[in-house]
Image (spheres, rainbow, N blue to C red):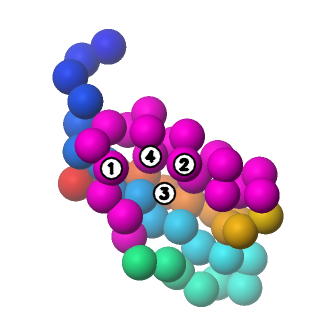
Amino acid sequence: MGKPVRTKLEMWTSWGYCMTPQIFSSRSEALQYAREMRDNGYIFGFRASPA
C-alpha cells in the first residue's frame, strides 16, 4: 500500500441531495467514514476520488 492519498468524498442521499464534499487525508479513512454513514442510513451512495 502506497502513501496516503488525499481523498475527496462526495455523498448523496436517497432523494438525490448531494452533501458538501469532504476531504480526508487517506482513501481508507474516507471509505470507512462513508461506510459508517451508509450503514447508519444517513446516505444512499458515495464517490471517492483523489483530491
Q: How far apart are marks 2 and 4 (CA)?
A: 5 Å
Give the amino acid at mark 3.
Answer: Arg
Question: Compared with residue 43, is residue 39 higher up or lower down, i.e. above or below?
Answer: above
Which residue is pictured at 64% across the width and 84% down the height? 16
Which residue is pictured at 37% across the width and 64% down the height? 22
Give the amino acid at mark 2.
Answer: Tyr
The residue tagged with tag 4: helix, strand or loop?
A: helix
- Circles 2 and 4: CB atoms closer than 8 Å: yes
Which residue is pictured at 55% across the width and 40% down the height? 32
Instruction: Please check the rendered image and state whether residue 28 is part of the magenta-colored stretch, yes or no.
Output: yes
Of marks 3 and 2, the one in the foreground? 2
Q: In which quarter of the image is the N terminus?
A: top left
The residue tagged with tag 3: helix, strand or loop?
A: strand
Q: How far apart are marks 3 and 4 (CA)?
A: 10 Å
Residue located beneath label 2 in the image: 33
Crowding at dot 1, Cα within 10 Å, few <14 / some 14-19 / many 20+, comes out as: many
Give the amino acid at mark 4.
Answer: Ala
Question: Compared with residue 30, is residue 2 higher up or lower down, i.e. above or below?
Answer: above
Give the amino acid at mark 1.
Answer: Phe
Judge from the rendering whether residue 13 lies leftward or rightward of residue 46; answer left or right: right
Q: Distance between the residues labelled 4 and 1?
A: 6 Å
Residue located beneath label 3 in the image: 47
Which one is earlier in the sequence, the residue at label 3 or at label 4? 4
Please state the extent of the stretch shown in magenta in the rendering.
21-40
Which one is earlier in the sequence, the residue at label 3 or at label 2? 2
Q: How far apart are marks 1 and 2 (CA)?
A: 9 Å
Judge from the rendering whether residue 32 lies leftward or rightward of residue 38; answer left or right: left
The x, y position of residue 35, in whole percent, is 64, 47
The x, y position of residue 39, in whole percent, is 77, 51
- Circles 3 and 4: CB atoms closer than 8 Å: no
Q: Which label belongs to residue 24? A: 1
Of marks 3 and 1, the one in the foreground? 1
